[in-house]
Amino acid sequence: MRTLEVCCYSVECAKVAESAGADRIELCASQADGGITPSYGSLKQAKEKVSIPVHPIIRPRGGDFCYSRQEMIIMKEDIAMVRDLGFPGLVLGVLDEDGHIHSDYLQALLQGCHDMAITFHRAFDMCVNPQQALQQLTDLGIARILTSGQQQTAEMGLPLLRELIETSKGPIIMPGSGVSLTNLHKFIEIGAQELHSSAGHHAASVMRYRKAGVTMCSDSEFDEFSHYCVDSDKVEAMKAVLQLGK
């Protein structure tokens, strides 16, 4: 049976995804940053309210994946929090200045993960040598790799995704970024057993009063009166296709 992981930026969305048939949740905060570590309150509520596996992301900030020693301390503390709350897995990734897996930093983080299943996220797509990175992650016992095949979208990265799926001797290769109902069959065709999708849409804010000329965001083009939500119909449809393509 193929697995559908849904990326969620709130506990509410995680509950919607679960009800619609998702198999696993990647829980993040801040879609604008591409996902950062959720708050303690979000983690605690997710553990209490969501029954399917939830894997929180461990990422202290947006931007690149080359972290300082102080950021590493923060990540270790966040891993301990996620572990102590009882989550079955988590999502992380670290690179060095030259675009390689930072093996020393990654091993240091893994020491605090104990028996949690680890997904190496799309930091993989910023690696200089994907096959070398795959071997490193295999040697370290990483459970899965979330990747777009080193392209902007997973559909564009299909050639490398196929190669990774065929050659991986350890981590599950999980395509993500732009995976949707319309292209799902392409990932089934290359043998993907797990798929990652946000399966959502932007919903308008319930605010009636909207102060003009004032923004809380450094990006003046960002719409602060909308937020990203999981679409239950999209999740249900995608799960149905995956069940038919088993």
Image (tube, helix red, strand yellow):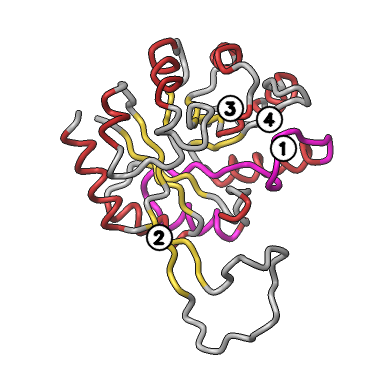
Tag 3 residue: 124
CA separation, marks 4 and 2?
A: 29 Å
Q: Earlier in the sequence, mark 1 or mark 2?
A: 1
Q: Determine if the magenta segment contains residue 50.
A: yes
Which dot, 3 or 1, sits closer to the camera?
3
Whether residue 130 is situated above or below residue 237 in the rendered picture: above
> Residue 224 or 240: which is nearer the viewer?
224
Please determine whether, in this image, residue 71 is positioned above or below residue 102.
below
- Closer mark to the observer between disc 1 and disc 2: 2
What residue type is disc 1 on? Lys
Give how far apart the Cα atoms at labels 3 and 4 are: 9 Å
Range shown magenta: 41-70
Lower sequence index among marks 2 and 3:
3
Residue found 43% across the figure and 45% down from its top: 25
Is disc 4 placed on a helix, strand or loop?
loop
Q: Amino acid at mark 3?
A: Phe
Within-10-Å neighbours for mark 2: few <14, some 14–19, many 20+: few
Question: Which residue lies under the disc numbered 4?
Answer: 94
Position of residue 88 measured from the top left corner of the image (x, y, whole percent): 48, 37
Judging by the rendered image, the residue that carries numbered circle 1 is: 76
Q: Is residue 125 magenta?
A: no
